[in-house]
Image (spheres, grey):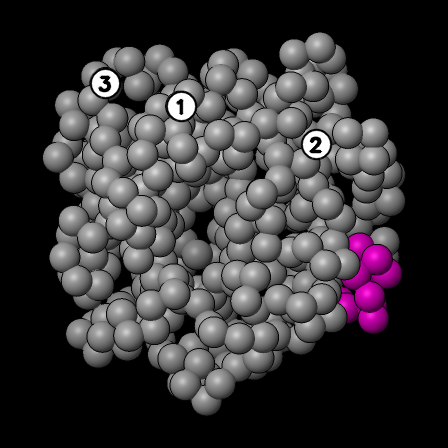
Amino acid sequence: MGLMIDVADTCLSDEDKAILANPNVVGLILFAKNLQDPAQVRSLSDSVRVINPNIVIGIDQEGGRVARLRDGFTKLPAMGAIGKVYDTDPAFAKRLGQAVGYVLACEVLAVGVDMSFAPVLDIDNGSLVIGDRAFHRLPNVCIALSDAVIDGMTKAGMATTGKHFPGHGTAVNDSHINDACDNRSFDEIWASDLSVFVANLSQLSALMPAHVVFSQIDDKPAGFSRVWLQDIIRHKLGFDGVLFSDDLSMKAAQIAGDMPKRVQLALTAGCDVALICNDRQGVIQTLACMDTIPQTGRLAIVKANLPSWQGSLLATCEQGFGDYTAMRQIVTAFMSNG
């Protein structure tokens, strides 16, 4: 258990190094501000591991509009674009989904990053922040395509994270900038949004709960709720993977109080890792309040076996992943024709 934080630039400051060496910092998340090209990203990742060899490095590389790795990396479609293909050609859509998952994972691993927080398992049902980040409006299509993407990521050796549990796709407000609420019953959620997570659960390494209040289940956002994290995820569903909070700097997380209180509530409710993004003072304040947290070993689930850097992204992927060239051809052909 502990914190996943960010850093401000493309290389580490002395303050970054001191914070990353703190035993309660177990993860680093990268953003566009940290990235220039594949060689620089690998250098940054390697420098982080000199300071903290056990750290988990993550990134949001979903495809479409949520893709932090751009310059020098394969352009990936939004998951909603794969969903549109499914409407006319389900078999090709599943092949494309597997190829996207494989290429995504290969390129992220090649630059020294353990995991992408993917796939999005929400349904496209009116949310202002989800939209084409979701595969489709229909749960059964989301299940089929997410299974393909997960298969591709897993074949490349990457852990998978289903988000945003139990589903952000029907809560209209963007929880980054507003409070978000879903007033449906548990049975309604179970039959739609949640069914996508349940279908994929045995293949997932981690879950990320939504900063959404499901008012008929609990008065707290899912990421702060023992009902969701303990009673439902751990006990009802029997999931024993890693639970990452969503970014605790988001507007919908502020209901819990200042940053140290948000972290305490998330970890106490059942999250293994609390994410604090773009809030260095919040990180410093939180670490100052924390005793050293014993580690359970659960984070080992999401640590990757990284390939050796071969001087370029292409060479590293071609030498480290046997199906990379063929899978990448599927993705690039689709993007060229799209």
Q: Which residue was labeled with disc 2?
A: 98
What amino acid is at disc 2? Answer: Gln
- Taking the image as drawn, is residue 292 in sight? no
Q: Which residues are magenta?
A: 308-317
Marks 3/2: CA–CA distance: 33 Å
| Within-10-Å neighbours for mark 2: few <14, some 14–19, many 20+ | many
Q: Amino acid at mark 1?
A: Gly
- Residue 310 magenta: yes
Task: Tell me if 38 is positioned left or right of 237 in this view.
Answer: right
Label 3 near label 1: C-beta < 8 Å? no
- Element assignment for label 2: helix
Residue situated in front as seen by the camera: 56 or 174: 174
Distance Cα–Cα, label 1 vs label 3: 14 Å
| Amino acid identity at mark 3 | Arg
Please report whichever mark, 3 or 2, sits nearer to the chain's N-terminal start: 2
**Residue lying furthest top in this view?**
88
Residue 250 position, x and y percent, is 31, 52
Identify the residue under disc 3: 184
Quadrant the C terminus occupies = top right
